[in-house]
Amino acid sequence: MTQYLDPETASRLGRLDLVARLVVEGFITGLHRSPYHGFSVEFSEHRPYMPGDALRDLDWKALAKTDRMYVKRYEEETNLKAYLMVDVSGSMAFADGDRMTKFRYASCLAAALSYLMLRQRDAVGLVLFRDGLVSFVPPRSVSSHLSVLLRELTAATPEAETSMSPAFHDLAERLSRRGLVVILSDFLDDADDVLSGLRHFRHRGHEVLALQILDPRERDLDFRRSDTRFIDLENTDGASITTQPWHIQEAYRERMEALLARYRRGCAEAGVDYVLLDTQTPFETALSRYLVRRRRLG
């Protein structure tokens, strides 16, 4: 089962519902062999009866079995409200060769996170964004909500330009109750603007998990071809440049590493949990970091 933690293996399953279930089941199977052994991935559907609770909410079957009084948990009493923000801008469509695109990786990971959160009885919502908010699915904690989230992900197409900051500021102002915001993006945008948006979430009391997803070639520009055409995926005019990659490789790597260092430093200063992934990184890396963040929230 743990083989489905490999992105390429999971992606070949096709349907996101299969990906979500098998990735999470593989993750749980592997937990006992990992440093995260002992982490709970289940939460009770009940809580102890308290004076003032309506008797109609009492679970009589539980009372008969345990001789203890419990009431059923309702959706508004859910453990956590989580919001998955998925970047659907044009740059997310990139993939080198036959690799999966960044958007496909983000979709599979978002599907797995949704499945895991709902399994924990947490409420999860979905936000798609480009240069602003594209769609918003409010969080719910019922298991049937998974199909709603996956339909939205499946229908999405990465296109057009990125401007992350307006989407972050807009959502930060919309969310009234504190929760967990998980962002899945390549973060190929102005770092200062992005970090300003992340700080806005923190200022509003939200926990933030930033998952930066890149293709391996975007980090090293290690293309073996001679003349290579680079196309701006977010420019509707189809702007491009043809060059020999090794002529610009060193300067490119320096700028890319500077950008990543800026995000690492800025997120640490803001109290944002930052994780750098590429499309070959096993899904368990992000799922484990989510569990760590979730445990801190109680």
Image (cartoon, rainbow, N blue to C red):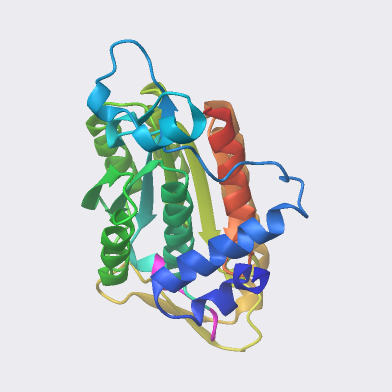
Picture quadrant where residue 177 is located: top left
Q: Position of residue 94 (x, y in %)?
A: 45, 73
Side of 150 relative to 121 (left or right): left
Residue 73 counted in the magenta span: no
Residue lying at the far bottom of the rendered structure: 226
Is residue 93 visible in the rendered structure shown here? yes
Q: Which residues are magenta?
A: 92-99
Instruction: Pinpoint residue 139: horizontal percent, then vertical percent.
Output: 29, 43
Q: Residue at x 40, y 41 (%)?
A: 122
* Residue 94: in magenta span: yes
Left or right of residue 139: residue 122: right
Q: Is residue 154 above or below residue 257?
A: below
The count of marks equals 0
Q: x, y percentage for residue 257?
A: 64, 53
Residue at 61% over, 89% down: 226
For residue 98, what is the image quadrant? bottom right
Q: Residue sitting at 65 percent across and 56 percent down?
A: 254
The residue lying toward the viewer, choosing from 212 and 252, is: 212
Residue 134: image location, x then y, percent: 22, 55
> How would you classify the magenta stretch by its main secondary structure?
loop
Tell me the quarter of the image containing the N terminus: bottom right
Residue 188 visible to an observer of this rendering: no
Q: In the rendered view, would you say 86 is above or below 36?
A: below
**Image position of 94 (left or right of 151):** right
Q: Which residue is depicted at the point 24% across and 37% down?
A: 170
Q: Is residue 248 above or below residue 86?
A: below
Find residue 115 and report its image quarter.
bottom left
Query: Could you say which is closer to the camera, residue 152 or residue 92?
Result: 152
Left or right of 77? Residue 39 is: right
Q: 132 and 105: which one is in front?
A: 105
